[in-house]
Amino acid sequence: MEFHTYTLANGIRGIHRQVKSHVAHCALVINAGSRDELPNEFGLAHFTEHGFFKGTRHRKAYQVNCRLENLGGELNAYTTKEDTTIHATVLKGDFSKAAELISDIAFESTFPEKELAKEREVICDEINTYKDSPMDMIYDTFEDMLFSGSELGHNILGRKTSLARFGTEAILDFRKRTHTTDQMVFASIGNMSPHTVESIAERYFAERTATSRQYERVAPQTCTPFEKTVIKHTHQTHCIVGNRAYGIREDRRLSLALLVNILGGPCANSLLNVVIREKNGLSYNIEANYTPYVDSGIVAIYFSSDNGNADMCLDLIDKQIRKLQQAPLSTRQISMSKKQFIAQLAVSMESNESYMLGLGKSLLVHNEVDTIEEICRKIDALQANQLTEVANEIFTGNSILMYK
């Protein structure tokens, strides 16, 4: 069996994959992110994640940060719109120590006011860094506009004025409401037997009090297409063209993922890279991305160019989209595209850490995980006409945001 899954008595689910390696990875994936914030809490999910490293009932901040690093390992965390993940990388002999530390900071963090005051300055610097990067900023602004008025429609980092209001009590209240055991998965990968991993998970996670979520997320309302230009006085024009997309539980998401990869994926032979960069030399950076959420998603085409070339880039993007909408790919084209997509997926799975994080997210959302063979079968089954239908549904009524 490729994966071993289990459920602890308090509702925390677990998934493990045994591989031959001297290194082990583990993570606690929590189904709580910025979309779970109340209107007066914007930025609190991310602030909570930073607070995990500021001390627990058993450790001071420097002890948290040095516990695994002294062993040559790593401890880190990140926040997205829908989840918060604490993850560690260690030698397989130190796996138990990593699991214990993750449990300690997830459930026993004290979020001391003195440490939080320093961390506010760190996050303010992070916000400034983000504001200095038009590429990062335009993505967030576009998503905020696309999901305006919904839980998904605000920046993960929050604002400096909001951070000033958040203290220990606010974080503890947020964690109590959102970080419930029925919304957690402990994922791991390494050369440990399933029995060993489950025993370690039992030791450090099963004793935590069972809790359950008492609220439901609200799906975003429909969005009216928009076009907006923001004057930034930059040397380049930065632009995003995009739309709402399928949620992570919809079957058509795989067709869209393949379509986006064909249109503007990471390979040099993507349609937009060939037409806009290679043939016309209009942009150094052009890419297409698809991000699915539980009940919605976003597809976005981003490019930067000299200010005078932006309209030509938009025209070429529109032409490529219309080609995909009007005529299915040839048998040869769809075959090559599927082979490329499968190979990219297989290469990404060579990173055990990324693979482990994907396992945790999949179990959290779907309560199951597809093997690589099952995923390949689903990709092979896709037909050219399915991509044409998806192109017409998703890329009709696009919105445009431009920084100049």
Image (spheres, rainbow, N blue to C red):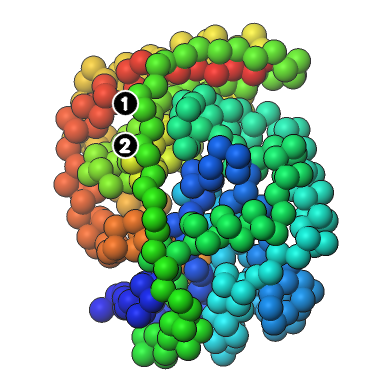
- Residues 211 and 8: in front is 211
Residue 14 found in image quarter: bottom left
Residue 64 shows in the view? yes
Horizontal side of residue 271 vs 278, given as left or right:
left
Q: Earlier in the sequence, mark 2 or mark 1?
A: 2
- Say the numbered circle drawn on residue 205: none
Q: Which residue is mark 1?
A: 394
Contact between labelled residues 1 and 2, with CB atoms less than 8 Å apart: yes
- Packing grade of label 1 (10 A; few <14, some 14-19, many >=20) is some
Which of the two marks, 2 or 1, is nearer to us in this view?
2
Residue 204 in the image: above or below residue 219: below
Label 2 is placed on what type of residue?
A: Tyr
Label 1 is placed on what type of residue?
A: Ile
At which x and y percent is residue 97?
60, 85
Residue 4 in the image: above or below residue 372: below
Residue 246 in the image: above or below residue 354: above
At which x and y percent is residue 387?
24, 32
Horizontal side of residue 319 vs 88, given as left or right:
left
At which x and y percent is residue 208?
48, 78
Position of the C terminus by quadrant: top right
Residue 199 found in image quarter: bottom left
- Residues 281 and 214: in front is 214
- Packing grade of label 2 (10 A; few <14, some 14-19, many >=20) is many
At which x and y percent is residue 150?
45, 32
- Residues 115 and 300: in front is 115
Residue 22 shows in the view? no
Q: Which residue is mark 2?
A: 246
